[in-house]
Amino acid sequence: MTAAGWVQFVALVVLIGVTAPPLGFYIARVYEGGPMVGDRVFTPVERLLYRFCRVNPDREQHWTVYAVSLLAFSVVGFFLLYVLQRVQSHLPFNPTNVADVAPALSMNTAVSFVTNTNWQAYGGESTMSHLTQMVGLTVQQFVSAAAGMAVMAALLRGLARGGGRTVGNFWVDVIRTTIRVLLPLAFVFALVLITQGVIQNTHGFTAAHTVAGVTQRIPGGPNASMESIKQIGTNGGDFLNVNSAHPLSNPTKLSDFLELYAILIIPFALAFTFGRMVKDKRQGYAVFGVMFVIWLAVAIGTMYAETSGNPRLSDRGATEVATSAQPGGNMEGKESRFGPIASGLWGASTTGTSNGSVNAMHDSFTPTGGFLVLAHIKLGEVSPGGVGVGLNGLLVFAILSVFIAGLMVGRTPEYLGKKIQAAEVKLVALYILAMPLVLLAGVAIATFVGSVKNTSIANPGAHGFSELLYAFTSAANNNGSAFAGLNANTSFLNSALAVAMLVGRFFLIIPTLALAGSLVRKRPVPPSAGTFPTHTPLFVVLVIGVIFIVGALTFLPALALGPLVEVLKI
């Protein structure tokens, strides 16, 4: 790595370290209620929305009612987005005259954005109207992120409270998250992106005549407003086809740095939200430590792999086996504005969250770099994870870790004073098994489908399998990024990946809410001499070890058939 690369990396770490704690404490105040900064602006808007939705903000919900509210909200969102795509050619704000979206693709896209996955089996500027992008996709990027954070708030209340039966009010949590957290941050960030050259208008294509005598169509549209929440809400879906590798979505090195920071800031901040809400900041520091260590290791590993390049290429030519690294690192599939360092850092960050945006093509990473970003998703996106859902996953692993520690010493495991018993362990097991089950089953079935083998996979052998494995990994973990080279816009893959997205979202969220409901009923017991402390470096190491062991035992055989074979063939 170059000195400039290290400066960028260190600057990102410092900026996150400085801004994450105050943002985390602010988000905690949003969920705790009571007087706070911004009440004069936000409270009237909230009251208007409560009245319009007929919500009593003072009435909390049992976890089952909370879950039904979330499911109903998601079903309505899916239906509205699906219909909007199917009739977009007959609606206004369609300056590019795009046609209605096909049924299978409409279904896949609606599921994708409702589940916060933002998997895009289409080219944005050539498939979706401005109205669909603004009213459909961008709105879902706000509310799907808010729903994930609302579930996190319910889980934290389950851990922090004792002897109760309610975990909050879903409608209140979604409204307050959207109004007080996501909208202000996205609004400010959109203005910053506009200053860097990200487009924000209602234009269609502009014809430009080049010196070579050809005509180039330059897209227009409300991109900055979508780009901001795409990053802030760890969504990942872009207005334009090549995502943040497009110069109209990510024009400068500064915009690249800020968009990367925007992916990470809320997930890291939520560790401090956790510490504040459970009244023990040390617990938040421990969770932050787990997130940071895993992210740091994958980021450095990916940057090193991409800057090292292909060992078979050197300044002596590709016909000789080189003894030195590829000059300049691996530039295949990368924007020359960013290079391998910024691309590797972005790849490690977007796969550690549920973001899925890209500023380079992961399919063109070195075998080692591709393996790292793929494996990073398979860890469950807990480093630092998507907004809300990442912290949920990490806390599930923390509960599993204290359960294992309790078995090792022969004591009833406890986490934050709550005894972890059979009911909680069963929910943890369901949470951990749901994603691998749909992921591995989906890949296994897809390898036998004729349209996948003959039409979707362009690259035969191990790399083609890696592309298919990445697609189901991305869908089941609600990530949304992809290895290029796989044609996913087929009836089978649109349907299969939609199922994977639904399972990866709701079969994890529902057990999380059930876990919150189980924990909130338990009264905390005071710590004793045999209580395993969960705020120490030892606990951080234990959780990291459990995450890696579970990931390795689950996915190593599948990884061995794809990316690991590619690494060994270098």
Image (cartoon, helix red, strand yellow):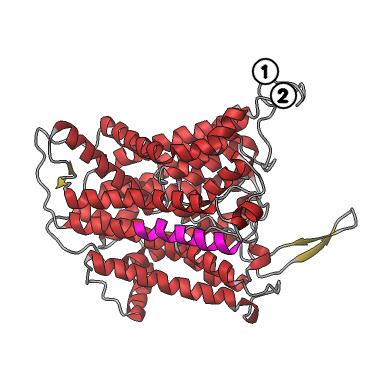
Q: In this view, does 228 lie above or below 532?
A: below
Write the start and end of the magenta stretch as one range.
490-507
Is label 2 in contact with label 1 (beta carbons under 8 Å)? yes
Tell me the tag on residue 323.
1
Q: Residues within 10 Å of mark 2 (few under 14, many from 20)?
A: many
Prevalent SS, magenta region: helix
Determine whether, in the image, residue 210 is placed left or right of residue 370. Answer: right
| Left or right for 237, reference 398 | right
285 in relation to 570, above or below:
below
Q: Quadrant of the N terminus?
A: top right
* Side of 71 where 343 appears, left or right: right
Residue at (30%, 52%) from the top-left corner? 430
Q: Mark 2 points at which residue?
A: 314
Q: What element carries label 1?
A: loop
Q: Residue 563 placed where, x, y %?
A: 55, 37
User: Of marks 2 and 1, which one's residue comes earlier in the chain?
Assistant: 2
In the image, 257 versus 373, the foreground residue is 373
Q: Can residue 184 be seen in this view?
A: no
Amino acid type shown at disc 2 = Ser
Mark 1 packing: few (<14 Cα in 10 Å), some, or many (20+)?
few
Residue 233, horizontal then vertical, whole percent: 46, 56
Q: Which residue is drawn at 61% across and 71% down?
A: 102
Q: Nearer the viewer, residue 447 or 307?
A: 447
Distance CA(mark 2)–CA(mark 1): 8 Å
Question: SS for tag 2?
Answer: loop
- The foreground one among 282 and 103 is 103
The residue furthest top is: 323
The disc at residue 93 is: none
